[in-house]
Amino acid sequence: MTDDQVVEVQEEETPPRTLPDQAVLRAVAEQFDDIEWILSSGQDVFILPKDLVLDVVQAAKDAGFELLADLTVTDYFRGRSPRFELVINLLSMQHRLRLRLRAPVPVDDVQVPSVVGVYPGANFYEREAFDLFGLVFDGHPDLTRILMPDEWEGHPLRKDFGMGSVPVQFKDSHQVQ
Amino acid sequence: MTDQKRRDKRNVDVWLTGTEEPGWLVDSTDEGAQKMAAHETAGRLLDQEGLVVGDDRVLDEDVAPEDELMIINMGPQHPSTHGVLRLNIELEGEIIRRSKPIIGYLHTGMEKTGEELTWLQGPTNVTRMDYLAPFHNELAYSLAVEKLLGIDLPPRALAIRILMTELNRVSSHLVALATNGMDIGALSMMLYGFRDRERILAFFEKTTGLRMNHNYIRPGGVAADLPPDWQDDIEFILDKVPPRILEYEDLLKANPIWMGRTLDVGVITLEECLAYSVTGPTLRAAGSGWDLRKAFPYSGIENYHFEVPVGERGDVYDRYRVRVEEIWQSLSIVKQAAESMPEGDYKTDDRKVAPPPRARIDESMEALIHHFKIYTEGFQVPEGEVYVAIESPRGELGAYLVSDGGSRPLRMHMRTPSFANLQGLPVMMADSLIADTVATIASLDPVLGDVDR
């Protein structure tokens, strides 16, 4: 009967964390337990919780990533939960390395830390991400719309923001009977 | 006031002082028109007189007494802002204390459009971003798509890409020299620069059908082979352009007026460049030898011999020098590419990506199907995300593409160099003369299509 059956729960060993090959990247990854390192199309990517963004960016800058190459957002909409993903591309000139940070951001909690304090060059990029995706960067000195008009409603690059279209009128087109 | 009286008042032209009815606004009469409208609040008046500023910017009271600061708007229709750039400049006398670029006047939602176009239609869209260097946009996009697809290109396609992008770098830098000259007052330089650029654009038109916005470099290779007598055209360009550039060197390099307007003007240091993500000739003029063609070679550029010119001071003059030297280097690459152009296909023979030759469609059912699928549904790209950057004439031009496995990108983002470089503009202009503004903007060489996308 069921009393006799003893279900042995075997504790599965968690696989050891894989760390990147390059010493520079490993030095950054080892400082944080929550960083997951993957290779995406052969490029180094760290996936991290959004609360860690500022700390990891600071650690990466200390490790030799001098330049913030790019900061953008992807909207996976229904394809993935959480829906948004903050993407930061860092560039290290001295090590000739690129590093991409990806931080998932849920739609109901769009607050992410601003990295303007670490890289002043993130200013325009964070304004763009705020403007087009509606992510709110905590600590940004001037979080205003940058590309869209100030009075614009909504965030156009979100997937649920319609494309909009103007019907084209062909005046003398042939009438199909 | 009754209606009758109101009608009377409208009919009477002359009013004797003191005979106005109570409530009559003296401001609306001729003598009152000189005053600010009375219904404006005191705060609004301060705003109109430029003593306080609205939402766009906040004054720092420590800089100067309020009445010594003036805010002026430059642009977006100013001829020297290279498009629709608007600058909010805070002046103390003739000195710029702070400035803020205001952009977005040319925003056309190209990244949103890119999500609606198939992977093959993408270059049509991105080529319009940086309209002075369209080949570079197409190349960055195509390299990213090819990286997601994991395909290799035949050597001739790679060499054609290098040939075209380096020619494009020459034509783009010629425009930079031309507009830089025009803004400082060397109007002849403007005419010369555009004249020589036209020689290169004529070759582009012959090859791609269009002077600009070519849609020539596509995922899988290039759209068409070089024209039959392309070597003569390249020879013509290599014959005609270098002597002209030597002439422009005579014209500007040691010209005391030119040097007076550019030396130690608009200085940005290497550290500031890195902090504000400024790349390209501006970064190299500040003393860094960083060039993505050397650091992360793409499309076989590592097979060509060229050098990376580096400046020292990071001023307008050094940026001008770096651009001229880059023209020489690019012409050298063009020469090498023309001499070593391999024979073979100009696009990949992976029929899932590149359409078959026209003749094959008549004889092969499979070719017809491939052709139909590519031009209707488009080819599918495996799921993934990738960032690929190349060295455009303005700096690091990156394409960040995300695919969900469909025939359209889930996200198409271009890291455009002008957008980031504009952040360096307030740094360059701080505490400089207002007269140097146009020289500084021109030396940064922003393309507003590249900024606003």
Image (spheres, helix red, strand yellow):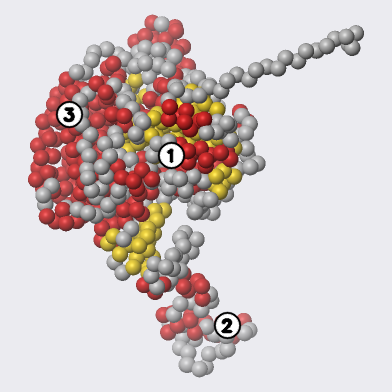
**Looking at the figure, which quarter contains the C terminus of chain B?**
top left
Quadrant housing residue B223: top left
Residue matched to label 1: A62
Q: State which quadrant residue B415 falls in.
A: top left
Query: Do the CB atoms of the residues marked 2 and 1 lie less than 8 Å apart?
Result: no
Q: Amino acid at mark 2?
A: Arg
Chain letter of the residue carrying label 3: B
Q: Would you place residue B401 above or below residue B187 in this image?
A: above
- Judged left or right of residue B205, residue A168 is right
Spot occupied by residue B365 in the image (x, y as percentages of width and height): 44, 6
* Residue B400 in view here: no
- Label 2 lies in what chain? B
**Dot 3 and dot 1 residues touching (CB under 8 Å):** no
Q: Nearer the viewer, mark 2 or mark 3?
A: 3
The residue wearing badge 2 is B6
User: In the rendered view, would you say B44 is above or below B442?
Assistant: below
Q: Is residue B90 above or below residue B7?
A: above
Q: Which residue lies under the disc numbered 3?
A: B332
Tell me where residue B106 appears, x and y as whole percent.
41, 46
Q: Is residue A71 visible?
A: yes
Question: Which comes before the other along the chain, label 2 or label 3?
Answer: 2
Q: Considering only vertical position in the picture, is B120 above or below B291?
A: above
Q: CA distance from mark 3 to mark 1?
A: 39 Å
- Secondary structure type for disc 1: helix
Q: Amino acid at mark 3?
A: Ser
Residue drawn 41% across and 21% down? Answer: B146
At a point 39% along the width and 10% down the height, the residue shown is: B361
